Image (cartoon, rainbow, N blue to C red):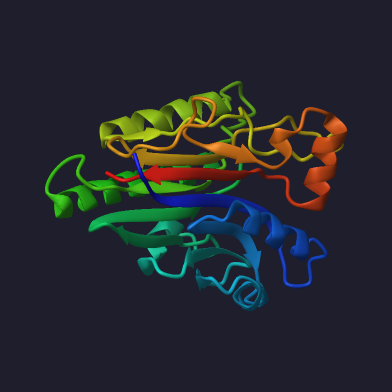
Amino acid sequence: MAKAFSLASWNVENFKEDDTKKTRVIQFLKEQDPDVFGLYEVVGKGVFAMLVKEMTSYQFHITEGPETQEILVGVKNGFTAFFTQKVEFKSGIQTLRPGALLTLTVGGEHYPILFLHTKSSSLPLGLGIRDDQFSRAFKFKQLLDKDAGGPGKANFMFLGDLNLMGMRYPFGKDIDPPVEVDKLKEGAKAVNMRRLAKNKPYTWWGGPTGGYEPADLDQVIASEQLEFKKVEGADIEVKGWPEYESTSDQANWIKQYSDHGLLYLEVQKV
């Protein structure tokens, strides 16, 4: 099948205009050459201006609000796209980021893509907020299906740093991250969506001195009818530190770029 568009999703870890890693980050992003990309933890509008200057073949959109870390979306020139800020994905918490909805039109087909950076916390409150954010995404899918002609019709995806870290509770009621992943998968299945498989088991790591084990925080949830170019049998190619074998190489990449790997995927025409 022919490619409809390529897509990248990357948390660049507190990405600022005066960041010493900005040249490396931009070059790495250019090397992936995605048709559409979302960056998370963008701090300040200076990054927006910097990318406009350095990546002239793209148009950019950024969320706005009282939070310090925004979501920035880039779309390659020549694509028809409409951007909307979705404040309902703040789940009533003013300091959280809104969702960034990009509706791409390719070959007469609409592809609504929702970029999310959900609540980061292993406390019960954090798990509850994430659960609410995911519920809103699934309800949104049902609305899109209705507009598209019925259940399973909308070519919808939501993706980003979904922070699936489970919950820690002091009275022996912990919820491990795989349990939260399973719940997300069940919610997706109920609305004709699925969690896409990655070619690497982990997407985040704070490095050997960070005190945490590698985790699978970054995800893509997509409508079941969508197909993707396979990489090692998976839908998503994880790029960055997870590609390296040695701990020292992984730690060096994290220092130079980000503690998150970049997710890359190619959507095939429906």
Q: How many marks?
A: 0
Observer able to see residue 123: no
45 versus 161 height, above or below: below
Q: In the figure, is residue 223 to the left or right of 200?
A: left
17 versus 239 height, above or below: below
Observer able to see residue 176: yes
Residue 203's image quarter?
A: top right
Q: In the figure, is residue 195 to the left or right of 262?
A: left
Q: Which residue is at the far top?
A: 172
Q: In the figure, is residue 255 to the left or right of 222?
A: right
Residue at 83% of width from left, 48% of height from top? 255
Specify the quadrant that holds the N terminus: top left
Residue 165 percent coordinates (x, y): 59, 35
250 versus 259 height, above or below: above
Residue 172 percent coordinates (x, y): 61, 21
Residue 258 percent coordinates (x, y): 73, 50
As rendered, which of 170 and 193 lies closer to the eye?
193
Q: Which residue is at the far left?
A: 149
Residue at 30% of width from left, 35% of height from top? 224
As rendered, which of 166 and 11 lies closer to the eye?
11
As rendered, which of 146 and 7 lies closer to the eye?
7
Residue 164's image quarter?
A: top right
75 versus 172 height, above or below: below
